[in-house]
Amino acid sequence: MRRAPLPEGSLDQADRAILTALQDGFPLSSRPFAEAGKDLGLGEQDLIDRIVRLREIGAITRFGPFFDAAAMGGELCLCAMEVPKERFDDVLALVNAHPEVAHNYERSHRLNMWFVLAAEAIGDIERTATAIERETGLTVLRFPKLEEYYIGFRVPL
């Protein structure tokens, strides 16, 4: 489940250009990969293959849109768990099996598993967190979003 660190030199110049360019958006068209690839000097299938590879090597963990769950009637919540080291991979699999889990990260801290729950409807966060607690026997600490801040985070490569 956990990915190994990227091998040194695993990203070439085209990979870096893809990662930099696609942080600013993705075309909304009938052939978005062809359109984005053209701007990057790549063919449609080459861009798709590179994105798949970037995911496989752990350079990216997902490729897709970010939705404003609250604006669509849903909710978001940052969650944390204290997971015994020897159970980490098993708990990770249980947590990630829930479609509401948007991100999941291991941290070097007493609270060593942090994840975001994104739900379509009010009440689904509580239902999902409770299910995770029942399945794992561990407490899910909930840190609901009180206010949203846009920081415009980008990682130029």
Image (cartoon, rainbow, N blue to C red):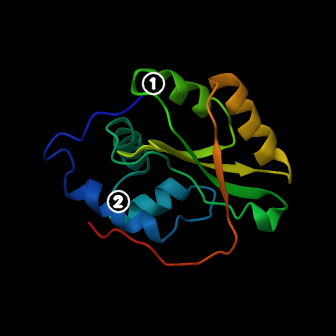
Residue 51, position in %: x, y? 40, 46
Residue at 39 percent across and 46 percent down: it is: 109
Left or right: 44 with respect to 95? left
Going from N to C along the chain, the mark reached first, 1 or 2, is 2
Q: Position of residue 6 (x, y in %)?
A: 23, 41
Q: Amino acid at mark 2?
A: Ile
User: Residue 116: x, y in percent?
Assistant: 60, 50
Residue at image coords 49%, 62%: 35
**What residue is shown with label 1?**
89
Foreground pick, 150 / 35? 150
Q: Is residue 45 above or below residue 16?
A: above
The image quadrant that residue 55 belongs to is top left
Of all residues, the one furthest to the left in this rendering is 8
Residue 96 picture quarter: top right
Q: For residue 18, which numbered disc appears in the image?
A: 2
Q: Nearer the viewer, residue 59 or 124?
A: 124
Q: Is residue 122 left or right of residue 7?
A: right
Q: Nearer the viewer, residue 52 or 145?
A: 145
Q: Position of residue 73 (x, y in %)?
A: 85, 61
Mark identifier at residue 41: none
Looking at numbered disc 1 in the image, what kind of residue is underneath it? Answer: Asp
Q: Is residue 115 left or right of residue 155?
A: right
